Amino acid sequence: MAGRAGLRTVVLAVDGSPHSRRAAAFAARLAPRAGGRAIVVSVVEPVRPPSMALLPASVRRQLAGAAAELERARLDAGRRWAEAAARTMEKGGWRAQASVRTGVPLAELLEAVVEARADLLVLGARGTGGLARFLLGSVADGALRLAPVPVLVVK
């Protein structure tokens, strides 16, 4: 755990939103322990086309190709976001590593925290409320409830 000497390992979640950019800027100002490292994680949910069993094969191929192209684009965007945030962390004195993962965002972030043996999870809050939060869930809320380490949510 972090002590007077600063944080040892931080996992920073990014998704390209203004909230995650603010979280990266804030986290970069935290005092790292000598050799402190930041694992910057962007999680991309897989693109799953709907069931297409009744569609003609040519349409299925076209839809599958479009889904694969969309997923590649989302992975590229996630990589850009993670690399930009890693550069921000490096300017703050952190050794930073960008990582793009595919899966359910909360589960992947919690797994990254465990794998890195992190002291802290940092993420931005999108401010979703009401019905949207109920229907979509909130990664920030889930992290606050389930993370094995302290969670810093930046608004």
Image (cartoon, rainbow, N blue to C red):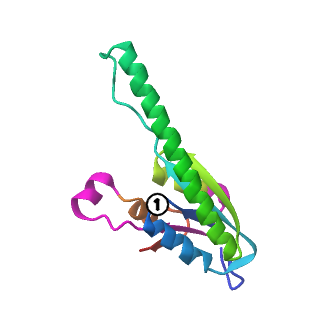
Across and down, in percent, residue 42 comes to 54, 55
Horizontally, residue 151 falls left or right of residue 5, namely left
Give amino acid for label 1: Leu
Question: Is residue 25 within the magenta segment?
Answer: no
**Where does label 1 land, which residue?**
146
Tell me where residue 30 appears, x and y as whole percent: 61, 80
Magenta region: which residues?
113-137
Judged left or right of residue 40, residue 141 is left
Neighbor class of circle 1 (other Cα within 10 Å; few <14, some 14-19, many 20+) is some
Image height of 151 relative to 6, above or below: above
Which of 48 and 152 lies nearest the eye of the viewer?
A: 48
The N terminus is located in which quarter? bottom right
Could you tell me which quadrant the C terminus lies in? Answer: bottom left
Compared across the picture, whether 128 is left or right of 28 comes to left
Write the residue at 61% across / 75% down: 28
Give coordinates of residue 33: x percent, y percent. 73, 77
Residue at the extreme bottom: 4
User: In the image shown, does 1 or 84 lie closer to the viewer?
Assistant: 84
